[in-house]
Image (cartoon, grey):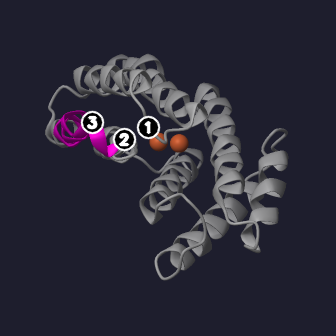
Amino acid sequence: MDPRDAQFWARQMHEHCTLIAAALDPGSPFKKIAAGLAVSWQNPSGVKLLDQTIEFKTEVLRTAQTSWIGWLAPDFYHHVLEEAVYFRRLIADDVTSSEELAIWREILSEHAISIGAMVDPSRRSLILRGFQVGDMAKRSRNVSLASRDVERFLQSTARVPSTIPKILRDHAIAEGVHFREVVMTRAMGR
Ligand SMILES: [Fe+2]
Ligand SMILES: [Fe+2]
């Protein structure tokens, strides 16, 4: 695996767990586990931690689909689970270039749609724009270009009232940058 991927995704796993720990209800038994995983991801060693993280996110997603456990939507847990599975596949060297592009279309599309949905309902047109940008990213042939549109959209959500945590917007923007600078560059070199 490309060491840039290993380093990048370890940081993203840390941020996922940090966000999950912050968002879960204080009464949730998952909260402590998420915080513990966040700490472990600061100094990751071996694939076991990733497998534990995948198992944990699967469990949290399953629970969130049937009961309220915190202020993040099940859609978020699904997204971060998919990213962990993608990371696992990168480690196993089990992703073709076309599969990788398809995965990124999904990732980028979901960033625009789910973060856009956290904009204040008074800014309806911006929320709708998020759906539009997200749908375009999903169908786009030029994923690099689509990733820039998603990034511009995410930046624009910083200028309006919303419930979007800054760490979440920065996290999604960093993924788009990683896609262009590492994944696309690598694909062109193949
Ligand atoms: Fe992420
Ligand atoms: Fe993401």
**Quadrant location of residue 136?**
top left
Between the residue at mark 2 and the residue at mark 3, the CA separation in whole angstroms equals 6 Å
Q: Nearer the viewer, residue 46 or 59?
A: 59
Residue 44: horizontal and vertical position, in percent? 81, 43
Quadrant of the frame with the N terminus: top right
Residue 46, placed above or below residue 161: below
Q: Residue at x 81, y 38 (%)?
A: 42
**Left or right position of 109 against 56:** left
Residue 25, placed above or below residue 135: below
Earlier in the chain: of badge 2 and badge 1, it is: 2
Earlier in the chain: of badge 1 and badge 3, it is: 3
Mark 1 close to ligand 2, CB under 8 Å = no
Q: Nearer the viewer, residue 189 or 176?
A: 176
Q: Amino acid at mark 2?
A: Asp
Which residue is denoted by mark 2 in the rendering?
A: 120
Q: Residues within 10 Å of mark 3 (few under 14, many from 20)?
A: few
Which mark identifies residue 123?
3
Tell me, yes or no, whether the two marked residues, 2 and 3, touch with CB atoms within 8 Å. yes
Q: Residue at x 18, y 25 (%)?
A: 142
Is residue 109 among the parts visible in the rendering? no
Q: Amino acid at mark 1?
A: Ser
Q: Residue at x 44, y 24 (%)?
A: 158
Which mark identifies residue 134?
none
Quadrant of the frame with the C terminus: top left
Secondary structure under the numbered disc 3 in the rendered image: helix
Q: Amino acid at mark 3?
A: Arg
Which residue is denoted by mark 1 in the rendering?
A: 162
Give the main secondary structure, helix, strand or loop, of the magenta stretch: helix
Q: Which residues are magenta?
A: 120-134
